[in-house]
Amino acid sequence: MLRIRQPNPETVRQFLQSQASSDFSYQAVGATLTTPPLGYQVDHTRVRLGHGEATLAQGRDALLHWRQFQLGWVTTSPPALPIEIGELVAIIARAGGFWWLNACRIVQTIEEPTRFGFAYGTLPAHAESGEERFLIEMDDAGDVWYDILAFSRPNRMSAKLAYPYMRYLQKRFARDSSAAMRNVARA
């Protein structure tokens, strides 16, 4: 949903409520844990956050608190949403002089001793159609990684018309989100 003004909490609540009974806007639900489907743009970003159990714990805590979205130009609502399958989240972005309000639902969670993350999928009121997975992972050498895997394609006419700009925003999000997670790990 494209808006001229920043959406207030009540607008966001009503928006999410309107999407609560909606199906996903794509067929390959859960494919960020297997193989992304054909016909979608696939983006994969992986950055090293540091080393050891403390960094793994910091990364896990950051994902639990949605810190990968606290970027100034993009955020989530509700801000303290639990990472649980079925939870709805609004992704709110300020770009191109407008506010973009997008709806997603958590489709998967990953909770293992050396891996933590989740994936959400887009609902009909999202500019894009697809899925995005966020993962914190410690490898066998003890290095901790932040990994984003997404597949998407335009879902709304505004996204189709602005496709090059949408691609720019997706790449900007991956870069800024990675930087935010590195900052969390350094703290």
Image (cartoon, helix red, strand yellow):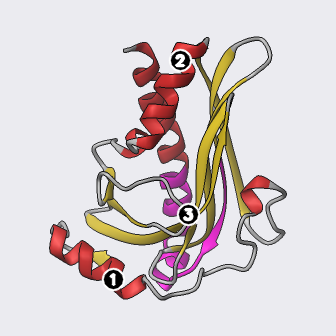
| Three-letter amino acid code of the residue under disc 3 | Ile
Give residue 59's position: percent from left, percent from top.
50, 28
Q: Is residue 85 above or below residue 54?
A: below
The answer to if 44 sits in the magenta stretch is no
Q: Is residue 179 visible?
A: yes
Q: Secondary structure at mark 1?
A: helix
Q: What is the crowding at mark 1: few (fewer than 14 residues within 10 Å), some, or many (at least 20)?
A: few
- Write down the region rendered in magenta: 149-170
> Is residue 5 at all visible to an observer of this figure?
no
Residue 159 in percent (x, y) is at 50, 74
Q: Residue at x 43, y 72 (%)?
A: 103
Q: Where, by quadrant of the figure, is residue 107 drawn? A: bottom right
Q: Residue at x 38, y 39 (%)?
A: 67
Q: Is residue 58 above or below residue 112?
A: above
Sequence order check: which comes first, mark 3 or mark 1? 1
- In the rendered structure, the answer to whether residue 70 lies left or right of residue 68 reads left
* Disc 1 to disc 2, C-alpha distance: 36 Å
Give the numbered dot on residue 158.
Answer: none
Q: Which mark is residue 17?
A: 1
Q: Which residue is mark 2?
A: 55
Which residue is tagged 3? Answer: 85
Image position, residue 40 (x, y; %) = 74, 67
Say which quarter of the image contains residue 142: top right
Where residue 89 sits, quadrant-wise, is bottom left
Residue type marked 1: Gln
Task: Give the SS element for disc 2.
Answer: helix
Left-right relation of 179 to 17: right
- Across and down, in percent, residue 2 comes to 32, 76
Q: Amino acid at mark 2?
A: Thr
SS at badge 3: loop
